[in-house]
Amino acid sequence: MPILLALVCLCGTAQDTITSRPAVKQAMDFIRAHHDADIEKQIAIAQIPAPGFHEEVRAAALRKEFERIGLADVEIDPIGNVLGWRRGRSQQTLVIAAHLDTVFPPGTDVTVKRTGSRLNGPGLVDDTRGLVALLSLAEALTKAGIETEHSLLFVCDVGEEGLGSLRGIKYLFHEGKYRDRLAAFISIDGTDPARIVTSEMGSRRYRVIVKGPGGHSYGNFGRVNPAHALGRIIAKFAETEVPTDPKTTYNVGTIGGGTSVNSVPFEVWAEIDMRSSDEAILDRLEQRMLACAREGVDAENRLRAASGTKLVLDPQRVAVRRSARTAQDGPLVRAAEWAARAMGLTPQRTVGSTDSNVPMNKGVAAITVGGGGRSGNLHSLEEWFEPEDAWKAVQQSLLTVLAFDEKK
């Protein structure tokens, strides 16, 4: 059955001629024919560890992939992003990106396992699927010899997750040598091809540190204990009620500190994430968390006042993202929605927390689209992926790029 048979006919616009072009059909057929090879590539990349701030080995592998598929001027920039070009008739540049890093620490077993049609492995989806979709898209364009008006810059970026705080894309747009040429941005992240992220939520991330004198658990019992105070802080904050519309969330993601089970810790900490698309709500949530922190420390100081010891609170804001959105009727969103409909889907504009936050906040049109397949349990050791029809999302990304390139 011809690959384009399922495409919806939308007559009367310049975009509708895209799907009938021989070169585009060739690219679409290439994407479908290489689906199985792409899945094997996804497994191979997922098994290269890429913890935040330690993406070097995976970056080297993606650099080789960029060179293999024939991208031009392939390089790893000073912050660690892998860059490769398909030059267009203009220097105005459309960036197509997927991130290298995962949320899993060094030493995590990233072996991919098969159970029937399902694949399991930490980071197999987020964002390894995006990396492979990006490679497949770039190779299809090259194999079909498709020329574009925009230059296309393919980027495998570092530091999207956690305290990386979008550092790779921030560097690209604020310090990178091509920053003045970047006209639009597409991130490939997640799987659902009907989901088009056109707005980005804000976030506040803190490391809440509690410090004290420490001591022996028996000999110095009665001194202020930072761990006890931290427990109070977390318990208080966990009772906070937040709105469901707009969706607002908080999470205590990591806890650390102390030196041994029989020592009163001299320092403990927790890392806390808060998110909302409403900046005013997010500001209030941030103040609520800080109040809980003060109350938890004050309670421990009062309880142990007779010891003559005292805790010190040090809440450190470690990352901030401001909410932003792309013009909802702009050419990039229209191109993505047309491509989704052309693939028989009903596009859904959604709010996300992705690399697109950076260009949006700089006033550059940006969206995030899915890489295809089905997935679940992201950011857990039980992350899973089902690859059936995942190639269709890559075709959809191809159509999005070409429709935007011909924007009127």
Image: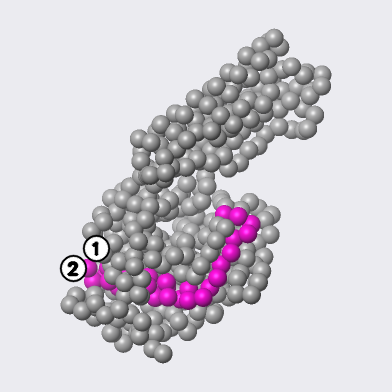
Q: Residue at x 54, y 26 (%)?
A: 293
Picture quadrant where residue 366 is located: bottom left
Q: Is residue 77 above or below residue 294?
A: below
Q: Report the amino acid beneath label 2.
A: Lys
Q: Report the amino acid beneath label 1.
A: Pro
Q: Residue at x 35, y 41 (%)?
A: 278
Question: Which residue is more in the foreground, 264 or 172?
Answer: 264
Residue 98 makes an appearance in the image = no
Picture quadrant where residue 257 is located: top right
Left or right for 11, reference 239 = left
Question: Which residue is more in the foreground, 43 or 245?
Answer: 245
Q: Residue at x 59, y 22 (%)?
A: 297
> What mark, if any, has residue 153 been given in the picture?
none
Q: Which residues are magenta?
A: 379-408
Instruction: Give coordinates of residue 362: x percent, y percent.
Output: 31, 48
Reading the image, the residue beneath label 1 is: 331
Residue 32 makes an appearance in the image = yes
